[in-house]
Image (cartoon, rainbow, N blue to C red):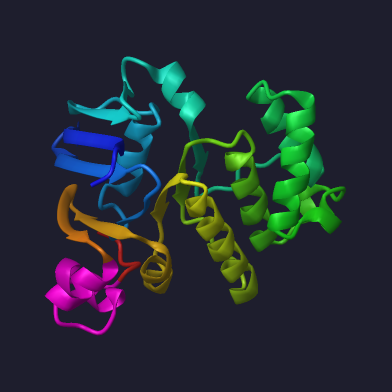
Amino acid sequence: MNESAIVIEHLSKKYQDVNALDDLSLQVAKGELFGLLGPNGAGKTTTINILCGLLKPSSGDAKICGYDVQKDPAKVKELIGVCIQETAIYPYLTGAENVDLFGNLHAMDKAALNNRRVLLLKKLGLSEDAKRRAGKYSGGMKRRLSLILALIHDPQIAFLDEPTVAMDPQSRHAVWDFLKELKKENKTLILTTHYMEEAEELCDRVGIIDHGKLIALGTPQELISQNKVKNLEEVFIKLTGRNIREES
């Protein structure tokens, strides 16, 4: 494997009698588009929250580009961008004002912020709607704006938690193309999704977790071949024993 962007070693998180994460170890290479897959409640969000410094593990270690997420949280936050499931936008601001607000929170240079805003709004098809209040956006437009907010400061690593939810097929494919461009720029992307065709199309490797444990790891084609099935969705159902959106 190439140089690691993310290293997780024996990570556990326990809530009373529930193991949200159970001795999880995983490495993600720099420039890799990695799919973190699993049923609802499997531990995906817990893992991301720990990697972002929002949650303290019960035991184990996690590093981002060599920086310990617990000991160097300020440095880690400089390196990452996070697109959460809930749209993190201010509805009474315009799309452009939302972008500028987040850019200013990252203390971006004014010229750099302006150039980056124009670029991302264009790439994600929001240029014509940039002066509209974000609260008037459709669900898919809000998701695309949330993606821009996560990436405005040009982070080295981005955590994308179901970024294409509520998007029509055209918008979804536009986001797919955009993520492929980011990968060409050697950005490291961690993608969670319930759309298995999305993971199969985009991801270099996927890790499937269930009940806080890593139960499968490899390229989509490796896992399809190993499990003697037709696609990644069938791999998922075979290994977890249930449909993708079923609550665990």
Q: Position of residue 89 (x, y in %)?
A: 67, 42
User: Is residue 107 part of the magenta span, yes or no?
Assistant: no
Left or right of 45 on screen, residue 144? right
User: Is residue 225 part of the magenta span, yes or no?
Assistant: yes
Write the start and end of the magenta stretch as one range: 220-243
Which residue sits at x=29%, y=74%?
Answer: 232
Most distant residue in the bottom direction:
230
Left or right of 72 on screen, residue 226? left
Left or right of 64 on screen, residue 155? right
Judging depth in this view, the residue of 196 and 186 nearest the camera is 186
Judging depth in this view, the residue of 210 and 114 nearest the camera is 114
- In this view, 229 is above or below 71: below
Left or right of 7 on screen, residue 64? right
Can see residue 98? no
Judging depth in this view, the residue of 187 and 103 nearest the camera is 187
Quadrant for the C terminus in the image = bottom left
Q: Position of residue 143 (x, y in %)?
A: 61, 55
Quarter holding residue 104: top right
Which residue sits at x=54%, y=64%?
Answer: 176
Magenta: predominant secondary structure element? helix
Q: Position of residue 91 (x, y in %)?
A: 75, 44
Which residue sits at x=72%, y=40%?
Answer: 116
Judging depth in this view, the residue of 111 and 176 nearest the camera is 111
Quarter holding residue 55: top left
Can see residue 82? yes
Which residue sits at x=75%, y=55%?
Answer: 122
Most distant residue in the top direction:
71
- In this view, 110 is above or below 216: above
Q: How many marks?
A: 0
Q: Position of residue 77 (x, y in %)?
A: 47, 25
